[in-house]
Image (cartoon, rainbow, N blue to C red):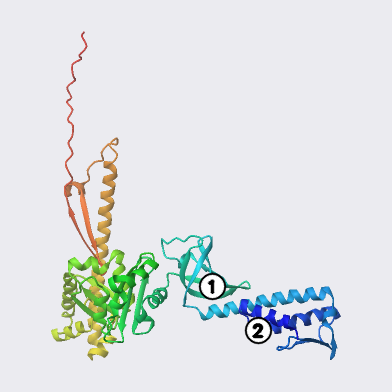
Amino acid sequence: MNQELLRLVDGVARDRNIERESIFTDLEAAMASAARKHFGTSEGVEVKIDRQTGDMMAFRDGQQIDIRKLGRIPAQTAKQVMIQKLREDERDSIFAEYQERVGEVVTGIVARFEGGTTVVNLGRVEAILPRSEQIPGETHHPTERVRALILEVKEVASQVRVVLTRTHPDFIRRLFEQEVPEVAERVIEIRALAREAGYRSKVAVTSLDNKVDPVGACVGVRGSRIKNIVDELSGEKIDIVRWNESSQVLIANSLRPAEVRDIALCFELNRATVVVVEDQLSLAIGKRGQNVRLAARLTNWDIDILTPREYSDAMELLMATLRKVEGVNDTLIDKVLALGIVSVLDLEEVGHEPLVQSLELAENLAQAMVAVATEEARRQAASKEQATAARAVLASQLSGREVAEDLPDLEEPPTTTAEAAAGGDTTVNSEATVSGDTAGSGAAPAPSAATDQHSDQAEPDPRPS
């Protein structure tokens, strides 16, 4: 019995997480390769190892041979073959292990940096955290412990490459499972998640137990649970939204802290028109449109934010346009509005087929309604383009005048007829919303500049004659 061989096989299998049978198979293949090289033949050599006793037997053309007498060169060949096969088995083991762990959060130690990529030591393998998968503004240091989600496992150039991420939305989902026991036990379910890594995230949660408040459980006592997640994400803001099967309620919840006055849903366009008062407009849109953008991703609805005046103006224009069509009355207009179509642009985009199917209208009537809406929408677009061009011209004239005023040594250019008629400088004011731009312009007189008056009379010479 060869106890030493058995102990070696068990130790390698345990340390490298390789199947014991694979190691025995590799040993047999390595010894057979050495014997074939010794005898100068490509076949007819077979090596078997007893799995229970560790005894090794070798045969050549059916005759048993003593493999220990092959010499130094075959032994070296067997060693090289064995090392290569063990590396292949270890690589396959690592690939299989981490392939099953894709989507799992792991903890590693920052080893080094290669360009913008951070190399993280996970123990058995070194993983990479690319720059694109790092939270913006976040920095790491060598020997620092870091948590990340396994995004992908692939084989590249005979090596296993594990790709980590800290920007994927599932990273937040896994952090909630670790910090909130109710989420891990499936008492609270995360129904939807939208994220802009490093800035803000929205998480919609619901409870399967009526006695458990999903929002309160995720926040924790004095915000202890959510604080741990925010700290792990380097201060990223997280909004916990209460899930609701009603799209209108869910959209209103997702736009918090803004208060929503009214919501019109157009299922044909998958668009929600949300009405908020003037003082809530900035809250609903968010910084650079972040709040409404995340709400749209969370709810899977295209969201347009309008003020009450913009909403009423759009509906009045739609109603006035439809009244031009023969056969359209107020009852039919109310049915169109009930479909969530609140502007001529919506009606143009919807087309006539939904009107025929949902409202059971005659096809020629539906086509006539869409035609007048399309004509009015194009007229509005042309007017908007003209206004935009006019603002651009005024802005260029204004900037040119400011440049001239900054050059005191140059002669002041003559006043143009347009400027003289306007009475001075022209200022442009504009407001931008998610639904569109509204702009107004007005003329403001330029401040009068004091002009030094010089007399043509020559001053007397103070020197005595």
The label on residue 323 is none
- In the rendered structure, which amino acid carries the disc numbered 2? Arg
Q: Of residues 158 and 251, which is closer to you in this image?
A: 158
Q: Is residue 341 visible?
A: no
Residue 124 image offset from top left, x and y in percent: 57, 73
- List the residue tagged with mark 2: 20
Q: Is residue 72 left or right of residue 257?
A: right
Query: Residue farthest to the left?
Result: 330
Q: Residues within 10 Å of mark 1 (few under 14, many from 20)?
A: many
Q: CA distance from mark 2 to mark 1?
A: 25 Å
Classify mark 2: helix, strand or loop.
helix
Q: Is residue 57 above or below residue 383?
A: below
> Can you tell which quarter of the image residue 369 is in?
bottom left
Q: Residues within 10 Å of mark 2 (few under 14, many from 20)?
A: some
Residue 156 image offset from top left, x and y in percent: 60, 72
User: Mark 1 or mark 2, which is nearer the start of the sequence?
Assistant: 2
Classify mark 1: helix, strand or loop.
strand
- In the rendered structure, which amino acid carries the disc numbered 1? Val
Residue 13 image offset from top left, x and y in percent: 64, 80
- List the residue tagged with mark 1: 162
Q: Is residue 126 left or right of residue 364?
A: right
Residue positioned 16% across, 70% down in the render? 309
Q: Of residues 318 and 180, which is closer to you in this image?
A: 180
Residue 40 image offset from top left, x and y in percent: 85, 80
Q: Is residue 139 visible?
A: yes
Image quarter of the C terminus: top left
Residue positioned 44% across, 60% down in the render? 139
Residue positioned 40% across, 68% down in the render? 232
